[in-house]
Image: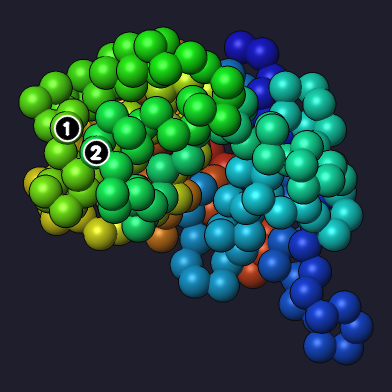
Amino acid sequence: MEELVRIKNMYKIYNPGEDEVRALDGVDITIHEGEYVAIIGQSGSGKSTLMNMLGCLDVPTSGSYYLHNQDVSQMKDNDLAQIRNKEIGFIFQGFNLIANLDAIGNVELPLIYRGISKGARQKIAKQALSIVGLEKRMKHKPSEMSGGQQQRVAVARAIAAKPPVILADEPTGNLDTKTTKEIMEILRELHRAGRTVIVITHDDEIAEQAARVIKLKDGKIVADYMNQQGEE
């Protein structure tokens, strides 16, 4: 497997000086294409900060982040936006759907920014919604769908353009047990299809479903292991 993510000696420091907070404190991570990784930590561990770095939503105080052999750690906002659009599919806990758009419209939205034609966008969106089992809900707006269905739309939006990385931030945090299992099964199927899946979570049960688990505490990696019981 080729190297997809390489983070080297990364620091994120807030309030430098006497009262500084080291949200990330010398983090080193390498993730290869096709891996299924869970990054776990409790509140204050640094996992949300690391998610922001992995997703090119922020830049580190120091250290490097190579994504597909390209150093993105010191890029400007416009360049980071292009990287996010092309390289990363986001799945958030809060779904982040547009209320006045139907399912197809929500999935199409990031494809518009890629300059994909209307006909091609609709075809891609329909395929993505079919993958997550929403063939019959494509014209429904978020208010007309359950929380689980809304999260499926969010997954479809994330995978539609086939980005190299699927980055899921607490993807089941607002879902019941049954729906959580369904969403996690979709993520497993994406991994089996060759996608790189990175899940950020505080939940041990969610983390243990991944093939690899990285544990954070106080901004440092305290464990990084292959999970025998997780996804192969």
Q: Residue at x 39, y 28 (%)?
A: 108
Classed neighbour count for the residue bearing mark 1: other residues with Cα under 10 Å, few (<14), some (14–19), many (≥20): some
Given residues 134 and 71, the one toward you in this image is 134
Q: Which amino acid does label 2 sit on?
A: Asp
Q: How far apart are marks 2 and 1 (CA)?
A: 5 Å
Q: What residue type is labelled 1?
A: Lys
Q: In which quarter of the image is the N terminus?
A: top right
Q: Which residue is drawn at 66% across and 13% down?
A: 2
Given residues 146 and 121, the one toward you in this image is 121
Q: In which quarter of the image is the C terminus?
A: top left
Left or right for 126, reference 43: left
Residue 228 location (% of width, % of height): 37, 30
Q: Name the residue under label 1.
A: 139
Q: How many labels does the image show?
A: 2
Q: Which residue is drawn at 16% across and 53% down?
A: 143
Left or right for 22, reference 184: right
Given residues 114 and 159, the one toward you in this image is 114
Judge whether residue 212 can be spotted in this image.
no
Instruction: Using the image, determine if residue 53 lies above or below residue 225.
Output: below
Label 1 secondary element = loop
Classed neighbour count for the residue bearing mark 2: other residues with Cα under 10 Å, few (<14), some (14–19), many (≥20): many
Residue 105 location (% of width, % of height): 32, 33
Residue 107 location (% of width, % of height): 36, 31
Label 2 secondary element = loop
- Whether pointer 2 and pointer 1 mark residues with C-beta atoms closer than 8 Å, the reply is yes
Residue 104 location (% of width, % of height): 28, 29
Left or right for 27, reference 150: right
Given residues 146 and 123, the one toward you in this image is 123
Q: Which residue is drawn at 58% across and 21% down?
A: 115
Instruction: Using the image, determine if residue 22 lies above or below residue 98.
Output: below
Q: Mark 2 points at which residue?
A: 102
